[in-house]
Amino acid sequence: MPKTEHWQWYVERFAPTEEHHHAVEETYYAGRSAFQDIAVIRTPTFGKMLVLDGDTQSSQHDEKIYHESLVHPALAAVDDRREVLILGGGEGATLREVLRRSDVARCTMVDIDGDVVELSKKYLPEWAAGAFEDPRARVIVGDALAYLRDDRETYGVVISDLTEPLEDSPSNPLFCDAVFTDIKARLAPGGVYVLQASTAGFHNMFVHAKMVRTLRHYYKYVRSFYTHVPAFDNDWAFIACSDGVDVAELASDRIDAYVAGLRGENYFYDAQTHRRLFSLPLYLRRELAKAGETF
């Protein structure tokens, strides 16, 4: 961390020629689990931040932009939300957003790194906002790959809140044919599989496009959507997959009714935001239309 007269800095390197610097007011924790480097810090602009392997995962002041985008388009699209599965999501914020719907009977969350879960409970309780204690939450610390292989239940929505499938990521083994087959087998008829899916910026959208091309082999509807997440300093992309529903084409009155059924007020997502999320820029549409590399 370079020093100035007033600050130490957390430097997030996106590429050899691109970095984002955050001034650090306080470091709550810095260490390594069995799977990854973990840091919890506080910054003047974004408040508390969770950092894994040098990459920002979420920040206190804008995490709802990310988590509402990941969760609510998928949940709004399905008729049966009784059972929901989250892969990853150790901070508990994805779990929080799912459990804001009273028609969710149970939400199962599987994260391989128990240290992230426990550190989040200790230092980032605002993220879960009590979701870990909700009787509808079933939190499993374990290998999502093994869970998917052994599980026989079905879910209306499967949410992947895992890190990107890069070579040095613990999530990399989860982006393969066997896992996609297992996830599809876990989806109830008309269900939706939604995942965070890397960056959508014009200069670094290529991993996202590769993910989209791969998933088109498995689902009838594979829809990219994205929004700017300030703490990430980038446009962040997601993918909604289904054989039964085109999440991009949800009617506004359906979304309005869904949002009205949430406990508490949304910060980011509603019917108007939904339309914006799925309105992709021309450069991204062109990239997604190309034949190219898959996983």
Image: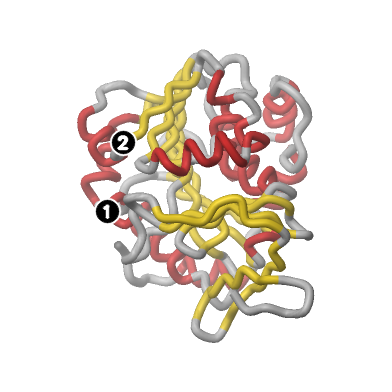
Tag 2 secondary structure: loop
Q: Where is residue 280 in the image (x, y as percent from the top left)?
A: 63, 61
Q: In this view, does 247 lie above or below 78?
A: below
The answer to which of 177 and 7 lies nearer the viewer is 7
- The residue under the point 32% across, 30% down is 186
Residue at the spot of label 1: 173
- The residue under the point 50% across, 51% down is 196
> What amino acid does circle 1 point to?
Pro
CA separation in Å, label 2 and label 1: 14 Å
- The residue under the point 57% across, 65% down is 200
Q: In this view, does 67 lie above or below 59?
A: above
- Check residue 96 in the rendering and tell me which mark sits there, or answer none: none
The colour scheme used to paint the residues is secondary structure
Tag 1 secondary structure: helix
Q: Are marks 2 and 1 in contact (CB under 8 Å)?
A: no
> What amino acid does circle 2 point to?
Gly
The answer to which of 79 and 200 lies nearer the viewer is 200
Residue at the spot of label 2: 142
The answer to which of 179 and 282 lies nearer the viewer is 179
Q: In which quarter of the image is the C terminus?
A: bottom left
Q: Position of residue 140 (x, y in %)?
A: 37, 29
